[in-house]
Image (cartoon, rainbow, N blue to C red):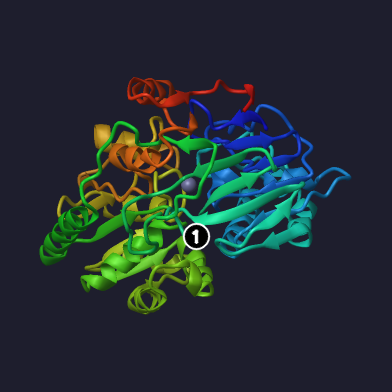
C-alpha cells in the first residue's frame, strides 16, 4: 500500500491522505490568512471523508471542478455538514463577495474560493452515504467506518486493499461527550495513521469541566450579568446547549450552530441521546433576526454563538455589546489558536471588533470542552496497535510524540508534508 501525506502532517489543518494513487481520504483547509490547501491536487478515483470539519472536508467540492467526478463516501451528517460549510465558504469568499472587495469579518480578505456553486451542486450527485460498520468499495478498496466519538457522523476509516489494512483514525475522542459517545471500536489493522492534537495535554474529566463552567455562568447570572459563550458551530454549540438544558441555564443560540443543531436533530442515530438534543433545542431560544441581538445582549442569560475563536459571526456583535460591564462574562469553550482574536482576548483582555481594538472589562474565562483524545486517550487507543506501524499526524508536536512512542517500543514516525511511503 502506498500512502501520500498531502496535508495535516506536522500541522493541524488541510488533512489529505492519498492511498495507492487512487483513494483520497479527506481534503481539507488550513484556516488562516490566506488559508492553505493540501500540497498537491490529486486526481482520485474515489474520495472518503472522515467528518464534517473544515480542516477535513473544506476543499472537497474543488475535486469536482474538472471532467472527472469521483464518488464521495461519507456518513449522512458528514455530507450535510460538508454542504453547509461549502455554502458558507462560497458566501464569504465566492465571486459575489470578491467583486465587492469584502472579506470575511477580518479573515482571509484576498482569498479566492477554490470551487464554484456548480461544484457544490455536483457534490450531491456523486455522494454515497454509509453508516458505521457497513463495508463498501471505493476505488477498489474495502472501506469501513467506525464511530470516532468526535462530532456527530465522525468516523475512523478502515481501508483494506487486499494486502494491507490501514486504519486512518482521523479526529477522535476517548471520553464521552453529551453530544456523542466516546470511540470504542478498535478494528484489526496493519498500519495506523493517528491524530495527535493533544498528545501532551491531559483533559480534566468532562464532568468537572462542566461543573466549573456551570458554577461560573450561574454566578454571573445571579449577579445580573450576561454570559457570551463562543462555540464552534459543529459539535460544540450542541454540546453547550445540552449542558445548558441539563443544568437549566437560560440560554439563547445564534449563528451557524442554529442550522447545524436543527440538521443534527434529523440524524438521531448519530447523536448520543436524540431526546436530550430535542430537549436542549426546545430549551434554547433561537435568535431569528439580527435586530434582536442588542436587546438579547442585555438579558440575564447565556448566549451560545459562533465563532468559537471570535474570528467573525454574531459573537462580534454580542461581545462589544457586553464588554464594558465587568459583571458580564465571556466563556471560551475551545482551544484558541495563536493569532486568533479569541487567543488575543484571553492573553491581553483586548480584542479587535470591526477593525477596532477594544478593551474588554467583562471577565474572560476558558473551558476545555475538547472533542479530541488527550495524551492518555491517545496512548490507550494506540495500546491496541502496539505491534503495528504508526504514523503520527494532525498535531503541532507530531515528531515529539512519535519519539515518545518509539521510546516505548512502538514503530512510530511523523511523516513530512508531501511524503510518499510504501507500507
Ligand atoms: Zn475535527
Q: Classify residue 221 as left or right of residue 139.
A: left
| Residue at screen point 34% across, 23% down | 404
Tag 1 residue: 256
Q: Position of residue 123 (x, y in %)?
A: 74, 56
Categorize mark 1 by other alpha carbons within 10 Å: few (<14), some (14-19), many (20+).
Answer: many
| Residue at screen point 58% across, 33% down | 35
Q: Is residue 250 visible?
A: no
Which one is in front, 247 or 393? 393
Task: Find the residue positioned furthest to the right.
Answer: 67
Which one is in front, 353 or 57? 57
| Residue at screen point 40% across, 55% down | 184
Q: Against 14, is 283 above or below?
A: below
Which one is in front, 165 or 295? 165
Q: Position of residue 99 (x, y in %)?
A: 72, 43
Q: Against 385, is 399 above or below?
A: above
Label 1 element class: helix
Q: Classify residue 286 as left or right of residue 361.
A: right
Q: Classify residue 79 as left or right of residue 271.
A: right
Query: In the rendered view of the protein, which quadrant contains the C terminus?
Result: top right
Query: In the rendered view of the protein, which quadrant contains the N terminus?
Result: top right
Amino acid at each position: 500500500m502506498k500512502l501520500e501525506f498531502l496535508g495535516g502532517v506536522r500541522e493541524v489543518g488541510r488533512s489529505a491522505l492519498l492511498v495507492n494513487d487512487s483513494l483520497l481520504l479527506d481534503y481539507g483547509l488550513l484556516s488562516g490568512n490566506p488559508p492553505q490547501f493540501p500540497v498537491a491536487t490529486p486526481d482520485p478515483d474515489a474520495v472518503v471523508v472522515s467528518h464534517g470539519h473544515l480542516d477535513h472536508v473544506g476543499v472537497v467540492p474543488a475535486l469536482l471542478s474538472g471532467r472527472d467526478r469521483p464518488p464521495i463516501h461519507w456518513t449522512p451528517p458528514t455530507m450535510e455538514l460538508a454542504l453547509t460549510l461549502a455554502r458558507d465558504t462560497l458566501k464569504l469568499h465566492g465571486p459575489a463577495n470578491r467583486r465587492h472587495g469584502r472579506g470575511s469579518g477580518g479573515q482571509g480578505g484576498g482569498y479566492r474560493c477554490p470551487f464554484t456553486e456548480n461544484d457544490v451542486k455536483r457534490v450531491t450527485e456523486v455522494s454515497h452515504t454509509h453508516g458505521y460498520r457497513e463495508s463498501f468499495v471505493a476505488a477498489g478498496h474495502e472501506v469501513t467506518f467506525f464511530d470516532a466519538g468526535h462530532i456527530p457522523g465522525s468516523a475512523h476509516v478502515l481501508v483494506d486493499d487486499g494486502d494491507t489494512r490501514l486504519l486512518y483514525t482521523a479526529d477522535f475522542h476517548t471520553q464521552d461527550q453529551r453530544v456523542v459517545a466516546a470511540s470504542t471500536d478498535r478494528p484489526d489493522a496493519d498500519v495506523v495513521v493517528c491524530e495527535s492534537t493533544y498528545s501532551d495535554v491531559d483533559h480534566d474529566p468532562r464532568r468537572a469541566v462542566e461543573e466549573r463552567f456551570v458554577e461560573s455562568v450561574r454566578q454571573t447570572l445571579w449577579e445580573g450579568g450576561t454570559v457570551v459563550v463562543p462555540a464552534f458551530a459543529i459539535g460544540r454549540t450542541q454540546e453547550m446547549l445540552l449542558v445548558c438544558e441539563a443544568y437549566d441555564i437560560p440560554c439563547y443560540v445564534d449563528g451557524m450552530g442554529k442550522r447545524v443543531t436543527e440538521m443534527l436533530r434529523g440524524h438521531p442515530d448519530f447523536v448520543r441521546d436524540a431526546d436530550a438534543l430535542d430537549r436542549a433545542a426546545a430549551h434554547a431560544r433561537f435568535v431569528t433576526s439580527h435586530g434582536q441581538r442588542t436587546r438579547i445582549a442585555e438579558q440575564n442569560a447565556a448566549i451560545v454563538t459562533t465563532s468559537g475563536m471570535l474570528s467573525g459571526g454574531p459573537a462580534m456583535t454580542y461581545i462589544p455589546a457586553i464588554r464594558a460591564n465587568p459583571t458580564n462574562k465571556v466563556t471560551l469553550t475551545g482551544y484558541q489558536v495563536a493569532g486568533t482574536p479569541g487567543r488575543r482576548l484571553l492573553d491581553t483582555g483586548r480584542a479587535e471588533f470591526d477593525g477596532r481594538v477594544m478593551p474588554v472589562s467583562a471577565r474572560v474565562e476558558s473551558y476545555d470542552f475538547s472533542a479530541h483524545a488527550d495524551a492518555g486517550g491517545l496512548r490507550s487507543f494506540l495500546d491496541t496497535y502496539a505491534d503495528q506501524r504508526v504514523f503520527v499526524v494532525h498535531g503541532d508536536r507530531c515528531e515529539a510524540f512519535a519519539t515518545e512512542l518509539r521510546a516505548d517500543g512502538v514503530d512510530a514516525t511523523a511523516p513530512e508534508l508531501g511524503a510518499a511511503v510504501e507500507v
